[in-house]
Amino acid sequence: MDDQFFHARNANAIDNTQATKLGNIPEHIAIIMDGNGRWAKQKGLPRVAGHREGMKVINKIVAKASEVGVRYLTLYAFSTENWKRPKSEVEFLMKLPDRFLSKELPKLKKNNVQVRTMGEKSLLPAHTQKAVQKAVRETADNTGVVLNLALNYGSRHELVYAMKEIGKDIEKGKLAAKDIDEKLIASNLLCSDLPEPDLLIRTSGEQRLSNFMLWQLAYSEFWFTEVLWPDFTEHDLLQAIQTFQQRKRRYGGV
Ligand code: FPP
């Protein structure tokens, strides 16, 4: 095991005070919630049981993130590549936003959480679209932590879309090729009003981005853990935050 990249679970409890005392709480945390299938397999359960359990973790993590002062939490819930999974698993995954929101929306509203989504929604089943639209609408005025659900999201898809939008403006004569700069590209990405993630967490021991926010993660700190997503706890989140606080971000400088 490569200790440099993986973080064994710290046996010492970290509390909010420890995490917050250093200041420098990441404003935006993005999470690749991986390992649901393996969690289920280890228990001799069908893969979907892992997804169901993984869904239950979201609430605790949103609450803890909000408590310590994180402003934005982006969760990779379904990628543009996940359609390749067996039909029954895809159907199950598509029911989760609905299930999660019909149970948790009142609590999210009460806790001032603003729900947002990022991804190609038109391809989602109507019931999934309806559930997320309702949550987005009913929490739009909330001012607390932003829970940004990446649903049918793929970074390359997002970049292609952005390039097409810019291309259209060039065709119309509104822009010239020389006008294309980083700011313009960033402004054509989904959720361009959100700051880039400061910290990326990926669970389950995998170390790859899997087409997640390739542009926005250019200068983010990465934190990998072997913990499978259904086992991920508030303590793990605090551990990730504490590691982040000890990193020196140089953005290419010295
Ligand atoms: C990756 O684990 C996980 C997913 C593709 C789905 C993640 C979704 C949730 C945790 C629930 C989403 C809930 C809401 C409310 C949107 P995997 O299946 O690839 O695990 P494996 O690598 O062990 O097979």
Image (spheres, helix red, strand yellow):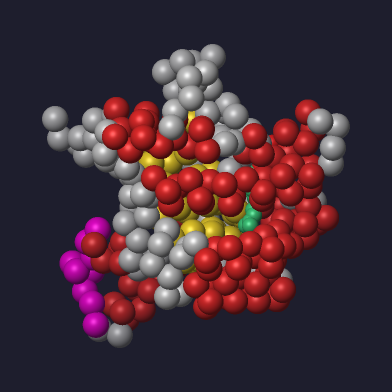
How far from the left and from the top, in percent, is residue 140?
46, 74
Rendered image quadrant of residue 120: bottom right
**2 lies above or below 132:** above
Q: How many circles with numbers are drawn on the protein?
A: 0
Position of residue 96 in the picture relative to residue 182 (left or right):
right
**15 lies above or below 52:** above
Figure quadrant of the N terminus: top right
* Residue located 66% across and 39% down the image: 230
Position of residue 136 in the picture relative to residue 89 (left or right):
left
- Between 238 and 38, the one lying in front of the other is 238
* Residue located 52% across and 38% down the image: 234
Rendered image quadrant of residue 80: bottom right
How far from the left and from the top, in percent, is residue 220?
34, 41
The stretch of residues the image draws in magenta is: 174-182
How far from the left and from the top, in percent, is residue 226?
58, 26
Rendered image quadrant of residue 47: top right
- Between 134 and 190, the one lying in front of the other is 134
**247 lies above or below 57:** above
- Between 185 and 105, the one lying in front of the other is 105
Magenta region includes residue 178: yes
* Residue located 24% across and 30% down the image: 248
Q: Is residue 160 visible?
A: no
